[in-house]
Amino acid sequence: MKSGTHSIEQSVTRKFIWRIVPFLTVCYVFAILDRNNVGLAALQMNQDLGLSRSTFGWGSSLFFIAYFLFEIPSNLLLQKFGARIWLARIMISWGLTATAMALVKGPVSYGIARFVLGATEAGFFPGVLLYLTFWLPAAYRARVIALFMVAIPLSGFFGSQVSGWLLSLDGLQGLRGWHWLFVAEGLPVFVFGIVCLFLLTDRPEHASWLTSAEKAWLASRLQAERDTARPIADISTWQLLRNRQVWGLTLACAAALAAGSVLGVWQPQLIKAHGLTDIETGMLNSIPYGIASVLMVIWGWRSDRTGERRWHTCVPLLLIAVGFGFAGSVDNLATVLALLSCVLIGAYSFKAPFWALSLELLTPRVAAVGLAGINAVGTLAGGLMVNVYGIILDKTGSPSLAMMPTAIMGLVGGIVILTVARSGGARVAGTRA
């Protein structure tokens, strides 16, 4: 590559990463926080509202049902209205809904609030992925997706500690601790939605912060990648939804999302069962997320550095299977935390190479529906595992048996990825350090 072109490439990617990615990452931290904070809120809320473990699990799953129903329409509307307006709409509405979780009074209102939260947040994640394809060449996507998606374990790491502290405000101004938790973690998102209108730029050609040479280089590079043949070509939506490779990707996605969702909701209760206080539980709950935060960025960078996607996606799924396969059968707290860390390392390290692989398999024309479809079905299946876990735990009292379905999903998902990625998209040309 000529030095001048290389300089432009570095300038464009650096400008985008520093201007846009940190903001989107912070927004996604709150998305995951508002999705999963019911896990810690449940330490007080379940008794106040009279929620059994199975009722709590089912109510939590309604988020994922709504997310599934509204995901594809939301991504299509993003293409119509532009990322700036549509992502702002998503954040404003989900921020208000997340705050309103403090108003729930019983099982019915809890279920309704969770459903509305899923509907309002739907489309944010695949919308951001689609937005990245407007700005970044393929060789940079895994590392940037990892930087964006590090929000998930970061929300667990910092969110667990902050949420534990918010629970300790129980009684302040006559409110329970879980009331403070929902209000303090929901309102900032409304503000971010307003900021989004001023910060984001829909397309590179509209960016006043890129030079003419930078815009020309990026347009040429992205067009060349769009013209590259893909295993999943331009087909109708109906054909896409019947495509075996798409369903293989969806199964693998569901396995990773199930692992993250199950621990996001149930891990605090698993840890507190060892006789800890709420604050101690919040502190220890953050440890697996802190470890996963670091390793998922390293794993995404390594995938881009080597240009390899297939094994970088498979290995984390196998780690999920191992962690869940043994975590429920040990009593030592340190060993439990180590195995739960394995699960979260797998669940989050999976994401960057997986979504980079998906973007390399899908043509740009079908990417909006494909990404949303994979994420929507995967999120629904993964979310329902939260309920499955609660049902099995209620019926058997055994965390080991409750974890086994998710462990099996991880194993099967890993095998499927090896098959799906065999025919193409497993390696990226033109990668660089």
Image (spheres, grey):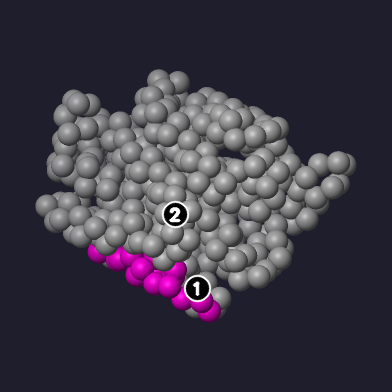
Residue type for callout 2: Lys
Q: What is the residue that sits farthest to the left in this orientation? A: 423
Q: Which residue has dot 2 on it?
A: 395
Q: Residues within 10 Å of mark 1 (few under 14, many from 20)?
A: many
The nearer-to-camera label among 2 and 1 is 2
Find out whether residue 319 is within the magenta segment. Answer: yes
Q: What is the residue that sits farthest to the right in this orientation? A: 173
Q: Which residue has dot 1 on it?
A: 336
Residue at horizontal 63 percent and vertical 58 percent from the top:
160
Q: Quadrant of the N terminus?
A: bottom left
Picture coordinates of residue 104, whole percent (x, y): 67, 33
Q: Which residues are drawn in magenta?
A: 309-332
Above or below 281: residue 332: below
Picture coordinates of residue 321, whole percent (x, y): 33, 65
Question: Is 170 on the left-hand or right-hand side of 207?
Answer: right
Q: Nearer the viewer, residue 29 or 68?
A: 68
Q: Quadrant of the C terminus?
A: bottom left
Residue at horizontal 38 percent and vertical 24 percent from the top:
73
Above or below 355: residue 364: above
Q: Of callouts 2 and 1, which one flags the residue occurring earlier in the amino acid sequence?
A: 1
Circles 2, 1 touching at the beta carbon (< 8 Å): no
Residue type for callout 1: Val
Residue 43 shows in this picture? yes
Q: Secondary structure at mark 2?
A: helix
Find out whether residue 350 is within the magenta segment. Answer: no
The Cα–Cα distance between marks 2 and 1, rounded to whole angstroms, is: 22 Å
